[in-house]
Amino acid sequence: MIGNVLKESKNHKTAYSSRKNHARKETELDWLATWNPFLDKKVKNTGKVLTNEFYNTLKQDGFKDVYVRSEVPELSYATEFYSKMGFEELPSGRQSIIKSSTNNYLIGNYDASDEDIIPMVATPEKIKIVKKYIGTILNREKSNSASISLDFLKMN
């Protein structure tokens, strides 16, 4: 999972979200993937736990809202997963599927501009509900982990 990656707009201003007219304290969940390394065992809830831990970093990093560019449901179950994690489709998001982001990563641009995505946002109210749910259902305890800066990844 990677989030809070600094981006630069076309007018050279920095932001933590890729969507146009993003909220002032909005960041982006830039990349999330899980897989099972054990062929003989079933592993569940890894994505939920990772998302919950990401939510736990928001306050210390000064963010409130989280933006994500979800794959369309025809390609994966990402939109369903993000909905369960408190994300809601932005108004008219399904009607006008976005093809690319507006801001480029400072560490290099890795977007596939031909991918269809559905823009979604999780607000503090929804995040609080999900954190309580994950903490209860999965018996999560507060960790001592903190955000890690990706400044060392900057490409020249």
Image (tube, rainbow, N blue to C red):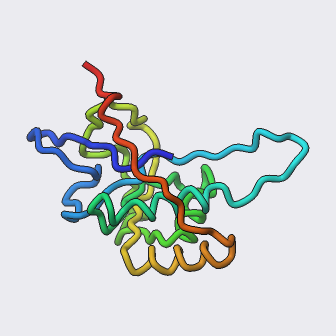
**Front-lying residue, 113 or 105:** 105
Residue 40 lies in what quarter of the image? top right
The residue at 35%/28% (across/down) is 153
**Front-lying residue, 41 or 71:** 41
Res. 108 in view: no
Q: Report the quarter where the C terminus lies.
A: top left
Q: How many marks?
A: 0
15 with respect to 71 (left or right): left
98 with respect to 22 (left or right): right
Name the spot of residue 93 as percent of width and height, x first: 39, 64
The residue at 17%/45% (across/down) is 14
The residue at 19%/60% (across/down) is 21
Task: Name above or below for residue 21 compared with residue 8.
Answer: below
The residue at 63%/57% (across/down) is 77
Name the spot of residue 23 as percent of width and height, x first: 22, 65
Farthest right residue? 40
Farthest left residue? 11
Name the spot of residue 10 as percent of width and height, x first: 14, 39
Task: Name above or below for residue 71 compared with residue 82.
Answer: above
Residue 104 lies in what quarter of the image? top left
Res. 107 in view: yes
Name the spot of residue 46 as percent of width and height, x first: 66, 55
Farthest top residue? 156
